[in-house]
Image: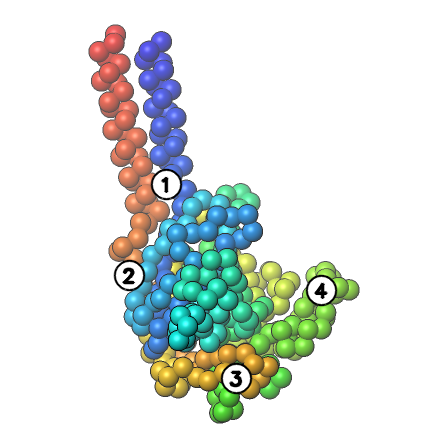
Amino acid sequence: MRLFSLVALFLASSDLFLSGAYSSATFTFTNKCDQTIWPGILSNAGVAPLGTTGFALQKGESRTIQAPSSWGGRFWGRTYCAEDSAGKFACVTGDCGSGTLECTGGNAAPPATLAEFTLNGDGGMDFFDVSLVDGYNLPMLVVPQGGSGVNCSATGCRVDVNGLCPSALKVTSAEGDAVVACKSACEAFGDPEYCCSGAFGTPDVCKPSSYSEMFKGACPTAYSYAYDDKTSTFTCSGADYAITFCPSPTTSQKSSSTPPSTVSNGGDQTQPATDGSMVYDGSLDFSGSAHPIHRVHVAVTVAVAILTAILQVGCQLL
């Protein structure tokens, strides 16, 4: 009976360790822009926040964050952030309105490029996308590291959308000499047909517009409007994720490092446009993060050690 109990304990322990191998995901943020980026993080409603909700990422710097199983939320890049004389923290694009470095539940002010995740969703799969539904402020690339799945592949927007932005969507500097962000048609006009709301609140009725098609043409794998699901949602199992801002190694900002003044378009604040030479970047160094296979190896090693100890005790009891 004692031996049976010990074996049962081993099975429970090994199940705990093996499930732990896939119980979290590692997100590695890398800044390849020519300026500091301040990533913001917002967990979905009812989901506990991560250990940080906002931080600074210097040019060339990387940072790793762990997310627990079943976490869901979004990441984005804030630009040209600073504290005023009263100590209030604010950003030119992607500001979350918290007044501090941490977003603490605040969402990104549009326009902002978003990376959205739901971990361990239907079938135990991670669902993720890069969205331009709220407009565009930075090039961003999401690359799964390890993992498996039919649609487990990179997605993002590597193009300088600011350079393609229609006049009606442009956000310009106060001087008017630079397009610094690109609004969505919903943000710019507020019409239900662009926002997929009201009478246009179903995929059968809400169709792509010429504006969303501009975003889609520039970034084919990114969400361009609310019901752009078929070509924009990706799934993986057991993956970690690399999120790169300005993914081309040669990408540079077109303006100086001095924060631009507030824009003349509706009082929004903005950032300089980015270079258009975006390329796929899959050769990132993730030596500091735990690969899924490594996590399994560690779990199995621990489980074997537990079994060995249990068998030794069991032999003594017989």
Q: Residue at x 36, y 15 (%)?
A: 5
Residue bearing the label numbered 4:
197
Mark 3: which amino acid?
A: Val
Pick the front one: 107 or 156 = 107
For marks 4 and 2, give the one nearer the viewer.
Answer: 4
Mark 1: which amino acid?
A: Ala
Residue 7: image x %, image y %? 34, 19
Decide: is 285 above or below 68: below
Task: Report crowding for label 2: few under 14, some 14 to 19, many 20 or more residues within 10 A (C-alpha).
Answer: few
Residue 81: image x %, image y %? 41, 73
Classify residue 70 as left or right of residue 200. Answer: left
Give the CA separation, mark 4 to mark 1: 41 Å
Upstream in sequence: badge 4 or badge 2 = 4
Upstream in sequence: badge 2 or badge 3 = 3
**The N terminus - image quarter:** top left
Classify residue 88 as left or right of residue 197. Answer: left
Element assignment for label 1? loop
Task: Report crowding for label 3: few under 14, some 14 to 19, many 20 or more residues within 10 A (C-alpha).
Answer: many
Residue bearing the label numbered 2:
285
For marks 4 and 1, give the one nearer the viewer.
Answer: 4
Element assignment for label 2? loop
Residue bearing the label numbered 3:
263
Residue 21 disc label: 1
Whether the residues at callouts 3 and 4 have beta carbons within 8 Å, the answer is no
Element assignment for label 3? loop
Upstream in sequence: badge 2 or badge 1 = 1
Task: Report crowding for label 4: few under 14, some 14 to 19, many 20 or more residues within 10 A (C-alpha).
Answer: some
Mark 2: which amino acid?
A: Asp
